[in-house]
Amino acid sequence: MRKETPFFFSKGAFILGPRIDRFRGADSKYIGGHSIPLVTLGGFILVMGFMAFNGGSQGSISGEKDGEAVGKAIVATLVACSTSGLVVLFLNKFVGSGSWSLAKIVNGCLTGMVSVAGGCNDYAPWAACAVAAAAGPLYITISAAMVKFRCAMQR
């Protein structure tokens, strides 16, 4: 990514503002997504896109050892996706809210794939699993902190 990207993203978020009716007051509850089937479909499309992107980052498949690098990248991506999704699933159920949340699982899967995207062709499956297992709790922590920070800003 370019160094200007966070600048433009933050300006766009500032212009758009928060999602309407997400935060009603200091004692308001979290309002989930509007369509869980569409969230799931979008997550599935992103998983396919990550496999194509990470596998295609090799640039060619005609040289010696290219196929092995592409396969390693795709395996690391899928291992990270499933590991982070499961970590988020069980942490949310047994430590967090106490409920099963498909939306959090999808976000956990995306977090795992993002966490290994930079070096996916160099990760062994166990390493991708370890990185994604660390990324899942990080996602839950940052997500909860963002909601609390936003509620504190409205007071």
Image (cartoon, grey):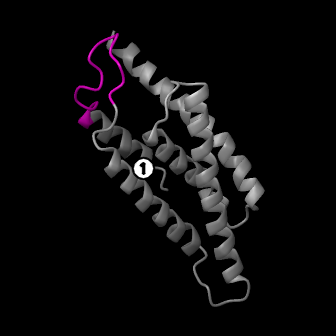
Q: Is residue 79 left or right of residue 40?
A: right
Q: Amino acid at mark 1?
A: Thr
x 73%, y 65%: residue: 122
Residue 24 in the magenta stretch? The answer is yes
Q: Position of residue 131 (x, y in %)?
A: 70, 48
Q: Which residue is mark 1?
A: 5
Q: Main secondary structure of the magenta part?
A: loop
Location of residue 93 with respect to 150 vertically, above or below: below
- Viewed as shown, does residue 44 lie left or right of 115? left
Percent across and percent down for residue 73 are 65, 68
Vertical order, 27 against 69 (above or below)? above
Q: Horizontal and vertical percent for residue 21?
A: 23, 25
From the top left corner, tell me how far across and down residue 141 is, in percent: 56, 29
The magenta segment? 15-31
Q: Residue at x 66, y 62 (%)?
A: 76
Residue 138 lies in quadrant: top right
Out of 90 and 60, give the one closest to the viewer: 90
In this rendering, is residue 66 above or below 138?
Answer: below
Element at badge 1? helix
Which quadrant of the view contains residue 30? Answer: top left
Q: Residue at x 29, y 26 (%)?
A: 22
Is 138 located above or below residue 21 in the figure? below
The quadrant of the picture occupied by the C terminus is: top left
